[in-house]
Amino acid sequence: MTMAESFGRLLQRRRVAAGLSQEDLAELAGVSTNAISTLERGLRRAPHSATLDLLIAALKLDDDARAELEEAAKLARVRRNPAQDKLLLSNLPPQLTSFVDRKREVAEIKELLQSYRLVTVVGSGGCGKTRCATEIGADLLGGFADGVWVAELVRISDPSLVSAVIARALKVQEAPNQPMSETLLAYLKRKRLFLIVDNCEHVIEEARHVVGMILHECPDVRILATSRESLSIAGEHVYRMPSLPVPTASELLSANEVSQYGAVQLFSDRAFSADNRFTLTVDSAPHVADICRRLDGIPLAIELAAARVATLSAKQLAQKLDQRFRVLTSGDRSGLPRHRTMRALIDWSYDLLSDDERLLFRKLSIFAGGFTLETATAVCGEGEMDEIAVVDLLSSLVDKSLVQVDVVAGDTRYRFLESTLQYAREKLREADEEEATANAHARAFLELAERLSDAWETTADRVWDAQAEPEVENFRAALTWALGPRSDALLGARLAGVVRCVWFAFGPSEGRRWVNAAQQRVTAEMPAAVLATLDLAEAQLAGLLMERKRSLAPAERALARYRDLADPHGIALAERQVGTALVFLGNIAEGEKLHERALEGLRRVGDRRSLIIALISSGSARPLAGELEGARQRLREALAAAQAFGADAYARSIQLHLADVEFRDGNAVGALQLASEALASVRGSGETMFDTINVTRGRHNMAAYLVALRRFDEARAVARDAISPARDVQWSLGFVWILQHLAAIAAFRLSSGALVIEDCRRSARILGYIEARLAALAVSRQYTDQQEYDAMISALRDAFGDDELSRLMTQGANWTEDQAVAEAMLI
């Protein structure tokens, strides 16, 4: 249950207690019945302040009840604002060209989606399936509680990556030691969202398998797939995408009449983009109609043809196409299927390119997720094809509609459409250039990863994230090739180690998987510096996942290697990592010695970001030794450094550490205030995995402080709101603590009422589940959670006695995660 639903439930309870229907309350408050309904159902988290005042007056609440409702509304507003929600609950790409004459198709598909959970849009390449799907997704924004998402399968050639691509689109973090498909299904089972799975045909078997599992196991997910063939699974409805309407050969139409056809509208729109002198005239209209007719109204084919109007008149273009198709069909136009029409158009466009344009066109197909001019030059620039040549050739490919250009927030990226990408990759293989180009791609992205790693030390979060995030798919592609059988192990090891900073922000579990894959190919001849970087990467990624024990051994190996290399920066990083692991495994004194040495080393080398992290590690360790004032000083130093640096996510993390220090010092009110401020400062949870964990951790801490203050209703609302995000980001430890807070609420509210007694039994079983999970994670409670646990155990022993408590906890120890959540939500 979310915070908003908590407000809605409280509003409903007050309304029923007052003996009012929704219509009655709406009339008394002067608001719509729909407004009351959406609040009570949780579709809207909290009312505006003025509306809240009207509701309170209409309900005639006393001071205590009024304060309760106001506080519930305040807590609901802690979440991000609606504008951020809309931005964050979708990854639909921006559309830079007009959407021509597909209103009927959009309406028909949307109507089908009302009745079917899977609709597959089928059609030939270039017929507009993807564009139509994204328009439908845009129309449905706001209609699904957990958003509208598109997974573009065109980027991959390995079918085993289908689950990973869908998970990546949904921002699902890979779980340690669990297949990605299982993690994806566990996430989607709890979601109500609309998923577009785009371009399934080249990985059709795996797409069929994954989509089928989602359809079977995730009842609140609706799917729109696009493919050249149907998925052929139960529950699917196939919609065959028609081509755009074209004039028939027998029609004698005016220019105005011709312009009413969708295919002609598209040609005219794209032709004008290519040459603003183009207009549909009495002379050109018949030739444009002929072009659109010969191209079967296929949108991409029309766009490719229209791009040529800068050098060919409509009449010349029609003549060229006529020659092309007569060769293909021996004059029998009926013998040319639509897929051959599209292929013929791309063949024709490709044949018209210069040798250098063809070479660049082929090589650019190696990119996954698009590319920049810089990366295109790094991968494709060789011999006489220097940066200037790449710029000229790329511009020419854009002008000919063979490469698409996107400009978002001032940054320019390039990409292929599905049909042209598959065609270019075929040409790359036919030319026997794929392996050399993949090697160049991996080496280029190794260089980019090294630059990003250096920049990570000195660059603010927003700037660094904006540089790294668009290249995640390319890093995946580079790692896949570099760690494959035809690459060299050293290249793979170097890339896996240095790209770790990217995974800090966008997926530590996945990053560790790549590191482990590289470690399996390690040889004795590899440079010690590469092995040290791999060990450090493994340790840092495990530490970020809060697996302290698992991070210790690789951190110690890295430290030994860096000392042998006399690398002061590496030594400082490894000392910080070893120190943190030791502190949380109980060796506080030795861990803090290493923290101090790491701080000195990082100050000397000027690694500002790692210095902030080391200050946080040291500051969070000091309370374990009872040094609360020392902890405050170090954490405040870290906060000042983070704010000056622009490390926004770390600044929020530090505020939460400071809140915990206040709680340890007996100031639960002050701790709650600090945690609330940290959450309020989040500009958008989910931008990176780290920020999402910050939000979830903040809610977990707030719940603990509210429990300590005996503000149980608020604590329950906050804890419930934290469960789903904790599971989404695979934060196993935080998830356990959140369940403990809910169990504690039941234990502390113990009374003679039968319902509350049952809640206490439920609390004991949840506690048994928690103990089993903690044992599996090999972690122990820290101060905040230990204080709560001790009081909780005492209350439950008083209620049931040791034997009955033990029996109940044993029952809970065998629960699944879903069982534990279901029971906790009943408290």
Image (tube, helix red, strand yellow):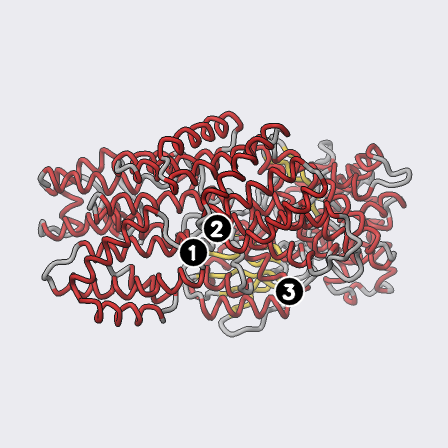
Q: Is residue 778 left or right of residue 792?
A: right
Give the residue type that dot 2 points to: Met
Give the residue type that dot 1 points to: Val
Q: Which mark is residue 160?
A: 3
Q: Position of residue 486 (x, y in %)?
A: 80, 60
Residue 330 visible somewhere in the drawing:
yes
Q: Position of residue 659 (x, y in %)?
A: 34, 37
Q: Is residue 361 above or below residue 327?
A: above
Give the mark nearer the N terminus: 1 vs 2: 2
Mark-to-mark CA distance, 3 and 2? 28 Å
Q: Is residue 677 above or below residue 295?
A: above
Give the residue type that dot 3 points to: Ser
Q: Nearer the viewer, residue 208 or 720?
A: 720
Q: Is residue 193 left or right of residue 534?
A: left
Q: Which mark is residue 47?
A: none
Find disc 1 in the rendering and name its residue: 779
Q: Quadrant of the N terminus?
A: bottom left
Q: Position of residue 562 (x, y in %)?
A: 68, 43
Residues tagged 1 and 2 counted as in contact (Cβ below 8 A): yes
Residue 247 visible somewhere in the drawing:
no
Q: Is residue 758 above or below residue 435?
A: below
Q: Which one is closest to the eye, mark 3 or mark 2?
A: 2
For label 1, count other residues whose C-alpha is less than 10 Å away and answer few (under 14), some (14-19) or many (20+). some
Element type where label 2 sits in the image: loop
Q: Position of residue 21 (x, y in %)?
A: 14, 52
Element type where label 3 sits in the image: helix
For label 2, count other residues whose C-alpha is less than 10 Å away and answer few (under 14), some (14-19) or many (20+). some
For label 3, count other residues whose C-alpha is less than 10 Å away and answer few (under 14), some (14-19) or many (20+). some
Find disc 2 in the rendering and name its residue: 546
